[in-house]
Image (cartoon, rainbow, N blue to C red):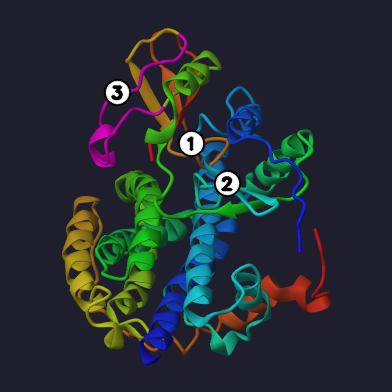
Amino acid sequence: MKQSKALAEYLIALADDELILGHRDSEWTGHAPILEEDIAFANIALDEIGHARLWYELAAGVTGTDKSRYPDQQVYFRPAVDWRCLQLVELPKGDWAFSMLRQYLFDAFESHRLEGVTASKHQPLADVAARIRNEEFYHLRHTRAWVPRLGQGTEESHRRMQAALDELWPYAQGLGAPLPGELELEEMVPHSHSLFMLWSSEVTQFLIEAGLDVPKSGGRVEVDRAVHSEYFPALIADLQEVAQLDAEAQW
Amino acid sequence: MVTIHSPKIALDEIWAALAEVPDPEMPFVNLVEMGIVRDVDWVDETLRVIITPTFAACPAYEVMGANIKDRLHQLSIENVEIHFRHSPSWTSEWITEAARAKLKAAGLAPPPHHSGNLVQVLLDPVACPHCDSTNTSLRNSFGTTPCRMIYTCNDCREPFEQFKPL
């Protein structure tokens, strides 16, 4: 009983990260620098929101809630204070460098987490992770290609990429904090801290190769997922606007 | 008490009908040969159709379910339930050879066989579905749908899409 509560909390945190990142990514739809990237990033946004739904549905299964309604309830009717996403994914989309770098940092971490969760002894969890992992492979390949492209592109692209890294790096440290419920799921899920060590050495080397200066210290780190950024209430208001006006709206 | 059952249509006839339901986004292939329809079974008076979504966020699933029901209603099967099965995950390995040939004929490079090793197979050259040259370049990992990538053939100069290996 206690474990299923922990698992539900863990799944909701995973889902919230994907949903909010997907929402931020979707803000580029129709605004990306070139048409191909518009299509690519809209696809990535769609995937992330699809992955969020898979995690919410799994959480519904764990809590014995109606799977068909649960994702919409969580996304459209949950107050901002009850979300458990990282501040990293809440930040406004910024410029193209900022959004590409955030997506890369997140995807690189997620690939390690999904690898770990795929090996979970809890089979439904492992199955969903395996499914998402294969799709995420294409995200990481795509966003990874943007890091040296911008880092070593023009003076302007390098300047923007460095500025993005300086701003994102402290927030990215939050990836290493245990997810809600994680500590009670000992044998079932990978330790965020171990994943973080892998991620940290991998991305640091990659960023240096891309011509970027990795900030020395992590800076201010908010690890509590119950604490949200100043940008989050407005994001949720925007996301939930239609549902709040008409909860039964059909389209 | 006696319950009178209406005669149930044989499963092979149902499979044949399902093999006529086109993929909404690629109407030259059907949902059976794409490996999306996984199982069909009668549960009392209801026909249960199990489908496995390809990409998690594929927006075509509601349409697929509706099209399956429409086709089965033509066989006078009124009670049809569509169930989603997520495990095991859909893989492009389930696409039949016949469907691969149809994809290629429609100008879509079929996904290469990968036996689980996506990392390796994505390093292999992709053959142009128009001229078969392997001198091709990836333009975009994402195409008109999440399940496709965009390439250009450096020999015949045609752009083309590939169905992603998954």
* Residue B28 falls in image quadrant: top right
Q: Which mark is residue B35?
A: 1
* Residue A68 falls in image quadrant: bottom right
Residue lying furthest front = B1
Q: Position of residue A185 (x, y in %)?
A: 29, 83
The amino acid sitting under disc 1 is Gly
Q: Quadrant of the C terminus of chain A?
A: bottom right
In the displayed structure, would residue B33 be above or below residue A159?
A: above
The amino acid sitting under disc 3 is Pro
* Range of residues picked out in magenta: B111-130
Which one is nearer the viewer's eye here, A13 or A127?
A127
The span from disc 2 to disc 3 (Cα, nearest Å) is 41 Å
Q: Look at 23% across and 36% down and name the residue there.
A: B120
The amino acid sitting under disc 2 is Asp
The span from disc 3 to disc 1 (Cα, nearest Å) is 25 Å
> To which chain does the residue with label 3 belong?
B
Q: Look at the magenta stretch and give its main secondary structure.
A: loop
Give the secondary structure at mark 2. strand
Q: Look at 37% across and 67% down and name the residue there.
A: A125
Upstream in the sequence, badge 2 or badge 3? Answer: 2
Give the residue pinned by disc 2.
B41
Q: Position of residue A119 (x, y in %)?
A: 24, 63
> To which chain does the residue with label 2 belong?
B
Give the secondary structure at mark 3. loop
Left or right relative to B102: residue A199: left
Give the residue pinned by disc 3.
B125
In the displayed structure, would residue B130 be above or below residue A2?
A: above
